[in-house]
Amino acid sequence: MTRGRLIINSLTHHARSHAGTLLGAIVAGAVLTGSLVVGDSVKRTLQNQAEQRLGKIQIALVQHDRFFRADLATAIKDEQTHFASILRLNAAGYVSDESGDIKKRANQIQLIGIDKAFWNHAMLKANRPPELNDGEALINPRLAAQLSLKAGDEFRLRIAKPSVLPRDAPLSVAEDLTARLTLTVAQVTDADSELANFSLRPGAVPPFNVFVPLAWLQNKAELDERANAMLASGRKPTKDLVQSTNAELKKKWRLADAELELIENETDGVIDLRTDRIFLDTKTLAATTDAQAALTYIANEFRLGTNAVPYSMISGVSNGFFEHTPTGDEMLITQWLADDLGAKADDTIELKYYVLGLNRQLEERQHTFTITGIVPTEEPGWRELMPKFPGIVDKDNLRDWNPGIDFDSSRIRDQDEAFWKQHRGTPKAFIALPTAQKLWANRYGEATTVRYTFAKDKRAQIETALQKKLNPADIGLVFRDVRTEAITGQSASDFGGLFIGLSFFLVIAALILMGLLFVFGVEQRALQIGTLLAIGFTGKTVRNLLLAEGFVLALIGAALGAWAGLGYTQALVKLLNSEWGGAIGNGSLVYHAEPLTVLYGVLGGLFVALFTIWLTVRKLSRANAITLLQGEPAQPAAATTGGKAIITAIACAVGAIALGFAMKDAQGQMKAGGFFGAGMLLLISCLCVCHAWLGKLAASGGPSIASFASLGAMGWRGSARRRGRSLACIGLLACGVFLLIAVGAFRLDPNEGANERWGGTGGFAFFGQSDVPVLYDLNTQKGREEMALDGEIDLIQFRVRAGDDASCLNLNQTREPRLLGVNPKALAKKNAFTFAQGTGWEVLDETEGDAVPAIVDMNTGMWMMHVKVGDVIDYPNESGGTFKIRIAGFLANSVLQGDLIISEKQFVKQFPSASGYRVFLIDSADPKATAAIAIALSFALEDYGLELTPATRRLAEFSQVQNTYLDIFQALGGLALLLGSVGLGVVVLRNVLERRGELALLQAVGFRKSALHWLVLAEHGGLLILGLAAGIISAAVAVWPALSSPGQGMPLKLLAWTVGGILLSGLLWTWLAAAAALRGKLLPALRHE
Amino acid sequence: MPDAPLLQLKNISREFPSAEAGAPLQVLRSLSMDVARGESIAIVGPSGCGKSTLLNLIGTLDQPTKGTIAFDGRNLGELDADELAILRNREMGFIFQSHHLLPQCTVMENVLVPTLAHGRATEDDEERAHRLLDRVGLAERLAHRPGQLSGGERQRVAVVRALINEPQLLLADEPTGALDQATADQLGQLLVELNAEENVTLITVTHSEKLATQMARTVELNDGQID
């Protein structure tokens, strides 16, 4: 005989009573394991998505608004690594019917120019790459479905015509921004083998992809031999590949990859450093030595008294360009200008010029200079000082100029035309470079030419020196690891943990049921325990023996539960792919279970079950042998008092009323939170009242017969017999029902405050996104004219730096959310949106130290980025480095979910090349006019791929995530309460079995069995109804704001069914328990008594 | 100290708090008694006189409100709960009115259960269990479970269980209370014989005059005091 043998004997002997305990452990284990495996399934889904979008790609070089030589891929190739340059452009796609009307449309398409090297990154290299001719396209299944396309079909794309010169740069031409392409579908590619869903960023859904021949796209986009992304994959580990490739890149890059050009002019004796971007940035300028810099700009007018010369070039030159280079406000003018204006030394000249505002708003300014000398009309090399201004450089006639400024050709005189023909863009005046920079330097650069003196072989020397001094990473020429993080399948939220949270009630209900059954089993063995204590076992030893029994049950339960949990996961995955699709952005989950997770589930199930069992037997070490041997329970309930309960009940009820009044005018989630709190106070009040009532009932009786007037009343009195148990039943049911219903208070209603500034829509009617940036302020007359937009419009425009979709629709973990730049004053003036934390939009203009303040939607901040207000994060800037962003505020549930918002001023500082606006909030001041405005805007910006979404619909999509999680919580909570009602049945059974003798006595004195049934039902049904009533009344207060808001979508029917189900299930179990306890002959129980 | 009494009770009182707020209920009042080694004693008296309370105090299942109990020269009041449990296990054996056998264990296993309290059953324990079960006429019932035994047989198993650790003191609380007269007589005789054979001191609480007369000494309790 051993203790092990004793435990095994006990387990087998009490197998029937242990069956319930085991069942509870199985349910708890199943829910725990099942929930954890949901995490595995999400992870595998994300891994699959990552495989489908990255193929074999390990690292990538991605440029924003810049272009490098496609040949760079060949230059840095090695035997172990495949490189592929690609050209990615934004596009909008259309399919028209025979009459030319647009039938189907898709925005935010990735148009990708690829060559054969691209297929090295596809997953199944053995597959023959799909053939692709000019004008043909491979499209991915999602786009094929969206546009209803199949091989051989024709479709059109509208692309944002890329420009080396940023569209927002001064003097860039803001027309001819888009181009139309007509393509034929060669094949719909396979997502599993052909990298159909290629994307370097994780998204909520696969992208729309169109693959075309690289050379063809380069030609169409007028970007010959250029690319803006390079992909690499090979045999090296990713970390090593990043290092070695960046090292190689640093050696092999050329000035052309930074859009720089060295132009040798032996005749003029100069070598000029220029850029197609017109303006040389500060880092490039700092890298040059032994050279002169010049900044050439267009002067609208030189004026001396009544004489004026229009549209001329003027250069700011650095010291040493002339023998007496101008300083300060000095100016050297050419002979031609002196003659034309009749100017001489010491005269003052008024210079007029344009500067370009943030949204291409032209502002004419003027500056006065003093003439310090007259220089020849042209010297060798002077005409080359004019950069290749688009719309000017290729014009034969001055009158044909099409600069990116207001140009009045009527002001052109014959002599101006003659000068242009003879001297082209030769500057007519020279000023000091620092003065020129003060007037015309901008975020793109501070000079237009760096000039070296010509010498043989000097060009190569200059290039080598520049390559050494410049870091390619500063202009974004740097490879980054795109694979490691993606392929881990890390999600934005811990879905395993999330589903444990959502199934929390179910686990608790199973554990309570298990604990109840186990403790009742222990109570049945009171005599045995007493005997063991009497014969010398210590309380601790007896407790450990029972714990050992519990351990075996918990282990078996956890193991079987883990197995059953896989079924639970499959059911959850099925629901998440259907009814509960809103929780995961209507994506598609695959079922997957990792053995280690299942093991964790087993261990978790074992732990919680064993812990629950320990809770039930922990006091056994202090059990009294005599009491047990007399057949009393091992752990008698503590006595309680009722006076304090009444005081607490009154205090809580008063608190609930006060809180309700205080919150009646609050808004949104604050109101919901306030009323939830009031409901909780009322719940505590109700439970205290029940507690006091049970106490009073226990003390009632005596001379009065009133409390014993009927069988029902006798039943009520019975419920006070075991006050602790009764109160636990009421409390459990009340808390369960309260939570189940009250979480509905947090249901988001997209229509709530839809036209109000404080609402989630910010009072805006539409949320718009375009594929092509809009360069003008559409709030101004001029902006509307430029975009051929009729009528007035009131909108907020955002600049966009592409990033990850950080909305809750995206399951992936996001490091770089999309960044928006906005004028904070515009939003502050409208007092748009509600701040969950933070003071308002003005905070975006308040920079503290070097961190840029940002506002983000609270859901995005908390759940996707995992930041809080005050946190500082690093964000990549355009020059390859990072800048600091300080989270300065959280927006309450809004249409701006998924984006990080900074001020426009800070945005253009960090991303000078990002032109125009691509996100819009269209105001709804006049709801009647809104629809007309939307139609007009859609028409005007059709070529820009504008997609307008009603703000309420966008908000509803986001709200659906939270609302679906609430649905899941309520559904699983309902299941838990049904399980809890089984627990009630167990309590009833136990109560009745304990009182078999008492009931036998009642039968002996003439009560019929049916009357005894009624007695038991009255007693326990009363507890059930009390619990439900307390929960429902409190919850009704908590959800009052939601109930009083039209269309908030509380699932009243579901809740009514759930509560009804709990009531019926509770009554059923009570009846069954009573029937089980009262079956057979009761009278022998009298003898036992 | 072979001649010293095995058990010495000096001025033992036991009070229980009253259900109504008032004076506590005095069950035993300044009771003193010596029990010699190998002695057999019957404690008799009317219901509520404190017989079982006295037995519980001797058996260390309860502590006196006043007074001291010395067992084999050791003051029981100075021992902690674990030491008392070991004492109960090694030096005492209990027999109750109801046998309180573990239904999940066989006869042999039930007998050996006390050996597990602070260790495990040895071969010597098993041999002793065999011998005692054979002695009480249950040699053929070793693998039977309590449910397969008669009331008298169950009580005999309980007696053997009480003797398995070779205790110095055997405490029996109404051991024949649940048995018919013939079986009760047999059990009484068995207890007396084992008292002599095993050299174990026997204290039994009983309402049965016949059992009481089988003991060497009878102590009559009345209103918490020895008459």
Image (tube, grey):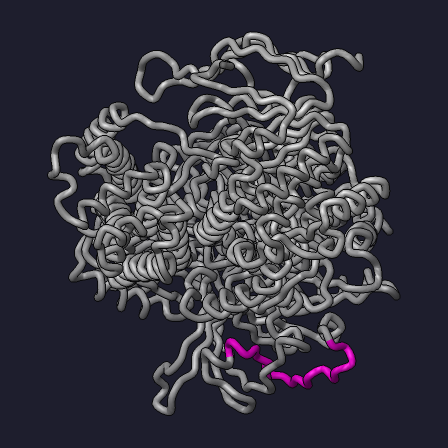
The answer to whether residue B1 is seen in the rendering is: yes
x, y percentage for residue B112? 73, 43
Q: Which residue lies most toward the right here?
A: A79
- Across and down, in percent, residue A91 comes to 50, 70
The answer to which quarter of the image holds residue A282 is top right
Residue A922 placement, left or right of B25: left
At 36% from the left and 66% from the top, the residue drawn is A941
Relative to A650, A274 lies left or right: right
Instruction: Decide which of A359, A105 is in the foreground and name it.
Output: A105
For this view, does B7 lie left or right of residue B222?
Answer: right
Whether A609 is drawn above or below A567: the answer is above
**Which range of residues does the magenta coloring cover?**
A124-143
Q: Is residue A135 magenta?
A: yes
Q: Main secondary structure of the magenta part?
A: loop
- Pick the residue in front: B115 or A829: B115
Q: Nearer the viewer, residue A1064 or A144?
A: A1064
Q: In the rendered structure, does residue A527 fall within the stretch colored magenta?
A: no
